[in-house]
Amino acid sequence: MGYIKLEKKDKIAVITMNRPEKRNALNSEVRQELYTVLKQIDSDKNIRSVIITGAGEAFVAGADIQAMKNYTVEEAIESSRTGSQIFSYIEALRPPVIAAINGWALGGGLELALACDIRICSENAQFGQPEVKIGLLPGYGAGIRLPRIIGIAKAKEMIYFGKIITAHEAQKVGLVTLVTSTSDLLLKAMELAQKLVQGPAAISLAKQAINSAFDVSEALEVSSKLYGAAYKTNDAREGILAYLEKREPIFKGN
């Protein structure tokens, strides 16, 4: 596997998003590799904690816009469904998952982090759902998970305006629980993971109990259909084209 790196040590699995030349942007190959690795972890009963991080200067800087350029409505819906299913798999994974966020966590990258149980980040981390800037909406569950974590008003502000927030702002609103230096990020994540490993089996049971209060499957399906509906708009075509041409989009509200 080239896009996902998996290491196992002391009952901890470390997943590294390994596409640094594209800031670990998500495309269909990355998503499929991630899903394969997650299934391997889920079947390994020795693993009791998981860390997800990114290679290079980003956690995940979003989706691969070039790959999205020619999506049909049906392809957009299927992409959203697939990504949502994989992130839901993370959310339901038996061992708890820690997101160690280095650098950008934008779009699908933030949605990946939202699916994790615990989020910590480096001081240079930045967070956002900027899909609106290319005429789209979040496709992998941010519309459901982000309000649950930081509150509906702040989530709407981030999504409606494509607002990017800093590491310390993210900690203030409860998006992350710890901000540390870049050099100490994985060390701090490993310390948390070790505490989980040393804890009782009840931790995994507690995860199931908490998740049982939030059945998001129906909401995710609605979200995927709305994501596809965005591709029917002229604004989405203009937004994607403007992004690829490195210019400001001209939206007309249709």
Image (tube, rainbow, N blue to C red):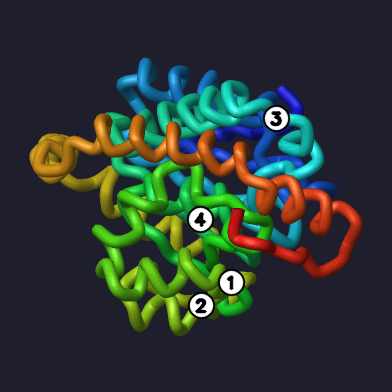
Q: Position of residue 247 (x, y in %)?
A: 86, 66
Q: Residues within 10 Å of mark 1 (few under 14, many from 20)?
A: many
For the residue pair 60 and 135, the one nearer the viewer reads as 135
Q: Residue at x 80, y 48 (%)?
A: 22
**Dot 2 amino acid type:** Ala
Q: Residues within 10 Å of mark 3 (few under 14, many from 20)?
A: some
Mark 2–mark 4 contact, CB under 8 Å?
A: no
Is label 1 in a helix, a strand or a loop? strand
Q: Nearer the viewer, mark 3 or mark 2?
A: 3
As drawn, is 44 to the left or to the right of 137? left
Gap between marks 4 and 3 measured at Cα: 22 Å
Sequence-wise, the earlier of marks 3 and 2 is 3
Mark 1–mark 2 contact, CB under 8 Å?
A: yes
Residue 72 in view of the camera: yes
Reading the image, the residue beneath label 2 is: 167
**Dot 4 amino acid type:** Leu
Q: Nearer the viewer, mark 4 or mark 3?
A: 3
Reading the image, the residue beneath label 3 is: 71
* Residue 106 location, quadrant: bottom right
**Dot 3 amino acid type:** Tyr
